[in-house]
Image: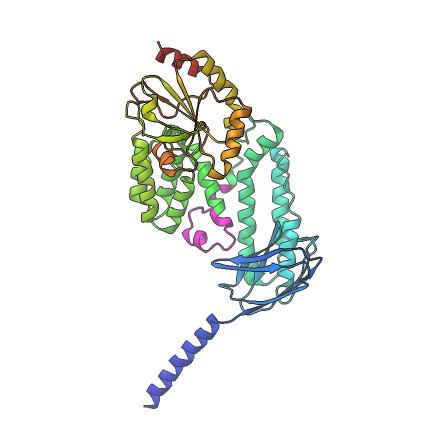
Amino acid sequence: MNKYFKLLLSIFISVLCSCNKDEISTNLEITLQNPVEGTIFISGGDMKYKRKVERNTSRVKDTLNLPYDGYYLISYGQASIQLYQNIGEDLKMKLDAEKFPSSTKFYGKNEEINSYLLEKELSDSTDYKLTEKKFLENLTSRKKYLKERIQDLPIKFREVEKKEIQYNYYTKIFLYPKIHRNLTNNQNFKVSDNYFDEIKNFKFDDTIAYQESQTRSYPSLTKFYYEWLARKKLSEYNGSHTLAFLSAVNQDFPKGKTKDDLFKFGLRLGLSLNDPIDKINNLVSKAVKDDIFRKEINEKYVSLSKLTKGRPAPHFKLASYNGDEVSLDDLKGRITYVDIWATWCGPCIAEIPALKNLQKKFPDVNFVSISIDRKSEIEKWKKMIRDKKLEDSYQLIAFQDKKFQNDYGINGIPRFILINRAGNLIDADAKRPSDPNIENQLSHLTK
C-alpha cells in the first residue's frame, strides 16, 4: 500500500511542478526618460505584449508570460532591438525615448548578453558598395570579432548565438550582388565564379532549425538560398523562376509545415499568366499539406486557365467616370485595349502619355482604363482623369473588386489586355503602350 501511495504522491508532485512551471511569470520593469506617446511592443513566438506610453509615463511595471528562454524583440516608436530573456528572470531596462535604442541600458542576469546584442546591432555597418574582395574581408573580420566577443558569455546563449552569427554572415553573402548593383548603378556587375563556394557545405534544408528559429534568421536565409538556386536553374524550367524555386524546395523538404511555408513564399505574388500554370498547380496539389492554400492556388489556376487566347473574356460591368455603367458587351464590335491601373501606381502613370498617343493613332480601337483604386480614393481618381485629360477614353473603376481581379488574374499593375471584336481574348497580358511592338499589333488587328 505504501508503495502505491508513494507512486501516486510522486506523480502528483510532478504534475504540480509542471503546472507551476507553466505559470511562471517574468517581471518587467522599464524606466523611461523623455517619454513620447506611443506603444512598447515585446514579441517572441506566439507572445505579443503591448503597453501604451503617455508623455508622463516614467515607469512601466508588468508581468510577462514568456513562451521560452531565448530571443525576443522589443519595439518603441519606429525602432526595434533584439533581447535575450529567460522565463522567470526579471527583465529590467532603462531607455531614453529620444535616443532609443542607442541609450538603452539593461540590468539583471542577462545584462551582458543584452548589452552585447545591442552593441552588435548598433555596430552593424555593412558597406555593400565595396569591391567583392574588400566586402568579404570586412564580413569575415566582423564574423570573427562577434564570435570572439561572445566567448565569455553563458554557454547556452553562446551556442545559439554562434549559429545566428553564421546565418547573418551567409545572408549578407546572398544580398551583396543585388545591393551592390543597385548602389553602384552597375547592373552588369557579377561576382567571381568562386564567390558562393563557402555555402556549398552548409545545410539549408534543416526543418528543425527552420521551425525552431526564434529570430526567423534561418528561415530567411533558407529563402535567400532557394531563390539563388532557382536563378541558377532557370534554363531547366524554361525561364520560370517560380517553378524552379518550388521544384528545388519540393526535392529537398518532406511534406509538412516547412515546405508549405516555403511554397507560400515562392507563390507570394500568386500565379501569373507568364507562369507554367499547369505544372505549378500539379506540383502544389501533390506537395502542399495546407488544404486552404492548395485550394487557393487551384482556384487561381482555374481562373488563369480561362484566359488563354481565343476564349471569351470574363464579363464585367463597371461604373464609369461619367456615372453610367459600361459592360464588356458594350465594347463588342471593335478591338478593345484594356489598361488596368491605379492612381498610386507610378509605372501606370508613366504609361499614360504613350497610351494617349496610341489612342490618337487608332481611333477605331476602344481604349478602356480600369482603375482598382479604393472607394475612398474615388475623388483622387476623378481628379487625375481631369488633370491628365483622359475623359475621351473609357474610364471605369473596379475599386477593390476581388471577382474582377481574380477573373483577369490581376496580381500586379500596370496590366494590359487585348480583346477582339467578338469579345474573345487576343492576349490577356498584352504589351505596354510604350512598347513599339504594340503599334504593329494594333495595325494588324484593325486592318
Q: Position of residue 95 (x, y in %)?
A: 68, 58
Q: Position of residue 136 (x, y in %)?
A: 60, 39
Q: Position of residue 279 (x, y in %)?
A: 31, 34
Q: Position of residue 9 (x, y in %)?
A: 39, 84
Does residue 381 appear in this view? yes
Scheme by which the image is coloured: rainbow
Which of the pair 319/159 is nearer the observer? Answer: 319
Q: Is residue 174 above or below residue 422?
A: below
Residue 213 belongs to magenta span = yes
Where, by quadrant of the figure, is residue 408 drawn? top left
Where, by quadrant of the figure, is residue 14 drawn? bottom left
Q: How many marks?
A: 0
Q: Give the magenta part as a residue range.
A: 199-219
Q: Is residue 299 above or below residue 368?
A: below
Residue 203 belongs to magenta span = yes
At x 51% / y 64%, what residue is drawn?
A: 66
In this rendering, would 387 be left or right of 288? right
Residue lying at the far front of the rendered structure: 323
Residue lying at the far top of the rendered structure: 447
At x 45% / y 56%, what residue is drawn?
A: 212
Which of the pair 428/123 is nearer the observer? Answer: 428
Where, by quadrant of the figure, is residue 133 drawn? top right
Q: Is residue 180 above or below residue 447?
A: below
Which of the pair 398/217 is nearer the observer? Answer: 398
Specify the quadrant that holds the C terminus: top left
Does residue 279 appear in this view? no
At x 37% / y 20%, what residue is drawn?
A: 336
Which of the pair 91/163 is nearer the observer? Answer: 91
